[in-house]
Image (cartoon, rainbow, N blue to C red):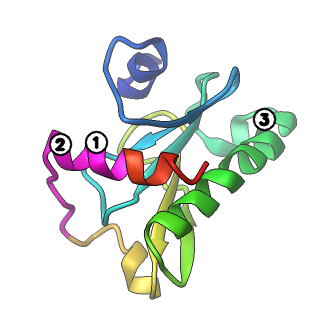
Amino acid sequence: MSSVFSKIVTGEIPSFKIAEDDKFLAFLDIEPLRDGHVLVIPKQEVDFIFDAPDDTLKDWLVFAKPVAAAIKKAFPCTKVGVSVIGLEVPYAHMHLVPINSANDLNFTQPKMNPSQDHLKEVQLKIVKFL
């Protein structure tokens, strides 16, 4: 099940990393709903979130928690929304998105198309709060 996310994990495809440990990786969505939109994935490939081992599910949220806090500080918002859809890429991934209303987490909205320079600015803005 090789996917674009598998290639990001191995470094074959570059990404704007936010956080990483031996089990998880958080990086910017390159077509975000809004600035601060981060994807969090397990390094172990799994297509459907509920096919992941129980420990992975627990540790995934714990790994995402400080990332969400950093997003909220970098991009003031009411909440950091969490969504796991899993239709676009066959690799379980969690979206963390700064939101002020439920509509801010509406994936049918047009996505942004930021420049590489803008993504780098967003990355640095979030990372400084980790």
Q: Amino acid at mark 2?
A: Asp
* Residue at x-position 64% and y-position 22%: 44
Tell me residue 62's x, y (percent).
78, 48
Tag of residue 120: 1
Is residue 121 within the magenta segment?
A: yes
Of the two numbered discs 1 and 3 in the rendering, the one whose residue sits closer to the viewer: 1
- The image shows residue 95 at horizontal and vertical percentages of 49, 55
Is there CB contact under 8 Å for labels 1 and 3? no
The residue nearer to you, when weighing 126 against 113, is: 126
Residue occupying image coordinates x 71% and y 43%:
63
- In front of the other: label 2 or label 3? 2
Q: Which mark is residue 56?
A: 3
The residue lying furthest to the right in this view is 55
Residue range highlighted in magenta: 110-123
- Other-residue count near label 2 (Cα within 10 Å), few / some / many at <14 / 14–19 / ≥20: few
- Up-down: is 4 above or below 32? above
Q: Earlier in the sequence, mark 2 or mark 3?
A: 3
Q: Is residue 91 magenta?
A: no
At numbered mark 3, what does the secondary structure look like: helix, strand or loop? helix
- Disc 1/disc 3 C-alpha distance (Å): 29 Å
Q: Is residue 77 left or right of residue 120?
A: right
Which residue carries the number 2 mark? 117
The residue most toward the bottom is 101
Q: Relative to 83, is 108 on the left or the right?
A: left
